[in-house]
Amino acid sequence: GGALTKSAAGQGGSKHPQTEPSILVVGSINVDLYKKLSSAGEVTISGKQIDMKPVKGMTLPASSFVGQSAMAEQLKAHGLGCEAGKEEALLSKLEGPFEQKTGGKGANAAAAAGQTFRCELVCNFGRESEVSNKAL
């Protein structure tokens, strides 16, 4: 998603209608799940403790997370290795509890644009985040 600029037509019967700048943001709202780490910096996947310190601060797609050398070694040692293309299925076994937060590039762009011009957001709100969507 990204921000697209448009102009709103002015009002009145003037030959030269005034325009008011506005922003139309087309994007998506994500529902992110956050997991607090143990004091040792570990999470549990399929009952196995996995040290997350090697990837602290990184935002990785599942394939890169599983392929990162320190993570790959731990997963293999715990019998949690997986075939290419099955990385997301493996990481879906990460045990909770999780905190749900709503965010996304479209929402961020709309919030930033709304600070300066009239703004409209066009996006897809999923049913999974229905309660959070009401605030948006």
Image (spheres, rainbow, N blue to C red):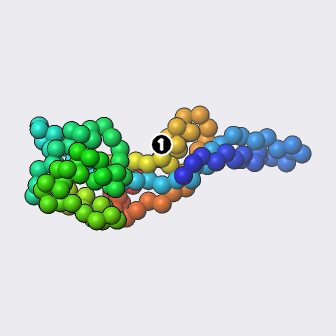
Which x, y percent locates residue 114?
Answer: 55, 39
Which x, y percent locates residue 62?
Answer: 33, 55
Q: Amino acid at mark 1?
A: Asn
Which x, y percent locates residue 37?
Answer: 17, 42
Residue shown at 79% from the left, 41% from the top: 18
Residue shown at 89% from the left, 45% from the top: 15
Q: Quadrant of residue 91?
A: bottom left
- For disc 1, the marked residue is 108
The reply to whether residue 26 is in sight is yes
Q: Quadrant of residue 118?
A: top right
Number of labelled discs?
1
The reply to whether residue 134 is in sight is no
> Could you tell whether 53 is left or right of 58 in the image?
left
> Could you tell whether 25 is left or right of 19 in the image?
left
Judged from the image, the secondary structure of the residue bearing numbered disc 1 is helix
> Could you tell whether 84 is left or right of 16 in the image?
left
Kindly give the residue lying farthest to the top in the view shown.
Answer: 116
Disc 1 crowd rating (10 Å Cα; few below 14, some 14-19, many 20+) is some
Residue shown at 18% from the left, 56% from the top: 76
Residue shown at 25% from the left, 63% from the top: 82
Q: Quadrant of residue 126?
A: bottom left
Which x, y percent locates residue 10?
Answer: 76, 45
